[in-house]
Image (cartoon, rainbow, N blue to C red):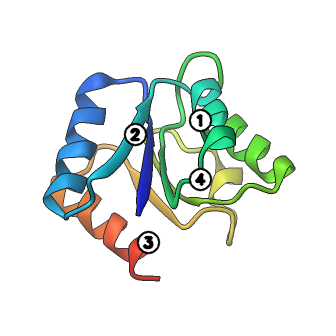
Amino acid sequence: MRFLLVEDQAALRRLYRGVLLSMGHADVSEVVNGREGLDRIRAARFDVVVLDQEMPEMTGLELLCALERERVRPAILFVSGSLPAEARAPGRVEGVLPKPFTHDEFAAAIRAIVDR
């Protein structure tokens, strides 16, 4: 499986990557904002996108809306301390993980998406 981490905080990207690697997922790419995430998703196929909300240039919700308009639909795990209600609408994303969370909670959220 191919993963894309869309997160502006380097420490959290390292944490996500470490958990994914420990779970056996080695194909992990990273970008630091929604605009870069959209460009990367347009250029390559990803199975799962781990998506933060509050980022410079383009928020997670703006990226989600852009993907929906373009009919590009990787599985989305939204990780955020400030997730807008519209992002939580049923069927819009595959998982929501409010910050802060533990390594185990992140791993469980990833497992739930991968096992679908």
Q: Secondary structure at mark 2?
A: strand
Single out the mark in the foreground, 2 or 3.
Answer: 2
Q: Which residue is drawn at the image coordinates 40% and 50% (left, top)?
A: 98
The answer to the question of whether label 1 and label 3 lie on touching residues, with beta carbons closer than 8 A, is no
The answer to the question of whether label 2 and label 4 lie on touching residues, with beta carbons closer than 8 A, is no
Q: Amino acid at mark 2?
A: Ser
Residue with the mark numbered 2: 29
Residue with the mark numbered 3: 113
Horizontal relation, residue 68 to residue 36: left or right:
right
Residue 45: x and y in percent read 59, 53
Q: Quadrant of the N terminus?
A: bottom left
Residue 35: x and y in percent read 64, 25
Tell me the distance, in whole angstroms, between the alpha carbons under discs 2 and 3.
18 Å
Q: Amino acid at mark 1?
A: Arg
Q: Which residue is drawn at the image coordinates 59% and 35% (left, top)?
A: 40
Above or below, 101 relative to 33: below
Tell me the distance, in whole angstroms, between the alpha carbons under discs 1 and 3.
21 Å
Above or below, 10 relative to 85: above
Residue with the mark numbered 4: 45
Residue with the mark numbered 1: 40
Q: Earlier in the sequence, mark 1 or mark 2?
A: 2
Q: Which residue is drawn at the image coordinates 40% and 34% (left, top)?
A: 30
Quarter occupied by residue 103: bottom left
Q: Earlier in the sequence, mark 1 or mark 3?
A: 1
Viewer-proximal residue among 59 and 43: 43
The answer to the question of whether label 4 and label 3 lie on touching residues, with beta carbons closer than 8 A, is no
Q: Secondary structure at mark 4?
A: loop
Q: Amino acid at mark 3?
A: Ile
Give the residue at the far right of this rendering. 69
Horizontal relation, residue 103 to residue 28: left or right:
left
